[in-house]
Image (cartoon, grey):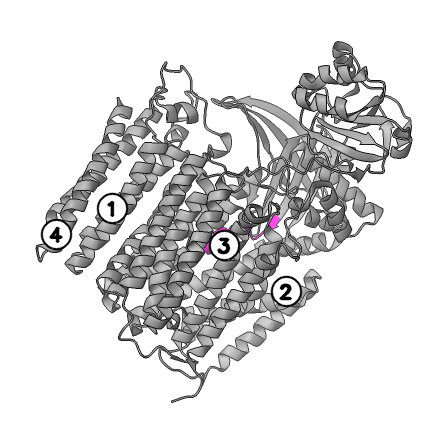
Amino acid sequence: MGCSAFSKKNMKTKILLPFTIVSFLFIFFILYVGLNRSNIYIPETVTNEKIPTFKVKVFNSEKELTSKEIFENDIYYLLNIWASWCIPCRDEHPYLMQLKKNKKLEIVGLNYKDKVKNANNFLNELNNPYTLILSDTDGTIAIEWGAYGVPETFLIHNGKIIKKIIGPMNNNLFKEIERAVK
Amino acid sequence: MKILNLLVIIVFFFNFNVSNAKDRNLNSKITKNLRCLICQGQSIYDSDTEFANSLKLVVEKKIIEGMSENEIYEFLKTKYGEWILYDPALNQKTYILWLLPLLLFLIGGAIIFKNLKIKKN
Amino acid sequence: MASLIGSYSLFFSLGFSVLILFFSFKNLKNTINFDNKLLSLTFLQLLFIILSFFGLIIAFINSDFSNSTVFNHSHTTKPLFYKISGTWGNHEGSLLLWLLVLTLFIFLFLISSKKQPKKYRVLTLLFQQIIIIGFLIFLIQTSNPFAQIYPVPSEGLGLNPILQDPALAIHPPILYLGYVGSSIIFSSVLAASSTNYISKEWAKHIKQWILISWIFLTLGILLGSIWAYYELGWGGFWFWDPVENVSLMPWLALTTLFHCVLVLEKKLLLTSWVVILSIATFTLSMSGTFLVRSGILNSVHTFANDPERGLYILIFLFTLIFLSLFVFFFFHKTDGQNNTSFFWLSKETSILINNWFMMYFLAVVLIGTIYPIFLDVLTSQKISVGPPFYHKLIIPFLIPFLLAMAIGPKLNWIKSNLQNKSHLLLLFAISLILSFLIIRILEISFLVNTILFTSAFYLFFITLRDFFIKRFKNLAQNIAHFGFSLLILSILFNNFLSTEVITNLKVGETYKSDELTINFEKIEKIKKQNFEAIIGKFNVKSDNELLDILKPELRIYNQPNIVTSEADIKTNLLSDKFMTMNLVQNQEYFNIRYQIKPFMIWIWFSVIIISFGGLFSFFKKKYEN
């Protein structure tokens, strides 16, 4: 079908040749830039969304709480998704212990797909930074939060997520949280 | 005997299919259209990561809660971004994606028909 | 030692490339006859690439960990078979395989094209050498398979367990014969364009090469798909993953090219279009390599990503594109074909319609695959393009495509009419009724499905009838079209009749539904050479009658330490029973999936029929010559 397009050669060549060259140069440019971009997708970390509404069981008890009850006060909350089997959680644990000292901040843990016994061992060994621990045995609550792995951490104020950390906390992120909570 | 066996199996298929819960079909339809964030080449349906397994449960819950297919997509889009959907919606960003192939089809057709002799000569 | 020989062989091959270039130019200017020195040099180059390739294989067999490729992709406890297949199961080794195919094909081309004009042969060799040199430098510069490690490690890192599989062991060589084999079409068309040799003779001669590439590419894609079916997914066989798409695109271009070359051979029409398609086929293969190896796209099958390599292939790819544009615009002559219009009802027209649809499918796959890159670069927005996109844009167009496939071959060259073709209508009516009944029974009440079934059945019946009526006339074409109708029908039935059970079970528990029960009887542990396996035993019963005993596995590989889930599949002519099990985090439960997938084997079988059509055509032409 391209046959006829090229048959009246001279006239069409004059239009087609530059057009083809420009298109290919454009494609080259896009692919060249694309090469240096990461191909791994990470959801946006800057949010200003309302916290999700859900019901959740309190860790190691039969008590159920709603999201409203958990984050009702006019202070900063830090929701930390963790599990005893998650190795990076051990790395960020000291930062959580540090943040615990901050009086304007309350740390809520969401225990992700864990066994009660293992989780308790973890906390006994490394201390407990959480004022409240919620239990997410099937991982569905984490999805309400838009999380997809452990650990993930959310900074909450006035019923809104103001910061989201994917993966373990580090020194810089720790300082950012300290600065945000004033 | 063999033919009888064959018949039994065919009937079995058909019955099995018909009585299959609608919810389950919807669930697998939805999860096939979701992309896994952990192993990013696979759908939620095909993946067996922790995240994928939980997301399957969430989809199941949402169906039971009475959310429609599109509402579930919308819900997940706000959580994880448009990237999670394998079926990109037609909007400003995707006009070229959806319409360019069709446009090329029309152009191709035009070129062919221009060269056809309709009359017998 | 073997590594050392292999390494030097690469440099020798590069040396031969330079010599070939030199003597080619000399041969072009001076003599009338083809210089046989060139043939000897090409043979020597091939020999050294083979030597290099065997050097790498031997390094793998001996687990020579001073070689970094071996160290990164092998392990002493691996079975010998996978040590050998590990040679091409990685980036460096597979590129060496690329080179092997490039040099092998040009050698075969030279010895089988003695009747062709000298200038054309020399130029083909020249263009092919440009590709060979490009890849040799790429290999030596950025991905040397013989890089040394010191101190020598005592143990290797092992081959990714999902690659330790018989289908995947032979998949790359078969696929590359088609994928890389298309390079010869590229070189040949550039040579033929430059020497104004696009003719009926050329078409007849290049058709054989198109067929070879096409057959191997078809089989290669099939093997990849079979592997994905039992290893990767949960019963799916085509995921529209970028890696699959990049193998499908050259296939679509090749299939179109093949049909087009038939017109060229008979009528000397469509010359420019054939040139464009020939260039496009190999360019698409190269683009595929770029997309997969550079890591610009995200896929299930990942090679070690390295932007530097990506940049090299990108530049090389565009060098080839601009080279071919140059040849096409400045050397290709389109004189002597005033008669470019066609009578509407003729074989030419039907082939044009085939082209039209194939190019559309190609456009869908190409745009779907690379659009996310463009969007990301231009607007920083990330989207995914997956199966629903391809299905929506392709399936409706399959309907007229299938009908054209059924009717097209009935038409004559130049001009035809459809008298005495009442059976065409009769078969259509039968197909329509049959499809209608099937849709009713299956309770899928979609208009599109009825028409889709109808058109697939129509092609099926018409080709089936032709086996009896026409017997040996157009047999190759009929086989391939028949295979295609069978493929579409199998996929349709498979899609609509598949059923599955997903549940979590502990050992000893039983899943019950109205139709069947699945009893998780026990698990046992087995230790093999390079992995430990946990094998579950499941009894599937229906109405207390034992249907199947399935034993899916979880394998814990030692090197690298990866857990894989191995499906157990019971195959018969009517359906596959497919079961996988997976661990559930921190619980005693196993996640079980049991699927009944009807006509699975027919999907594979029909692709084999399709490629058999190509094979038949290849040997028929040989016989006629």
Subunit bearing disc 2: C
Residue type pointed to by label 1 = Gln
| Secondary structure of residue under mark 1 | helix
Magenta highlight range: C597-610
Separation of disc 2 and disc 4 at Cα? Answer: 60 Å
Image location of residue C186, percent across then percent down? 31, 54
Residue at left 68%, top 60%?
Answer: C442
Mark 1 vs 4: CB contact within 8 A: no
Between C275 and A159, the one nearer to me in the picture? A159
Answer with the quarter of the image where residue A7 lies: bottom left
Distance from disc 1 to disc 2, alpha carbons, whole Å, reads: 50 Å
Answer with mark 1 or mark 3, whichever residue precedes in sequence: 1
Label 2 sits on residue: C449
**Residue C407, horizontal then vertical, whole percent:** 46, 74
Residue C129 image label: 1
Q: Amino acid at mark 3?
A: Leu
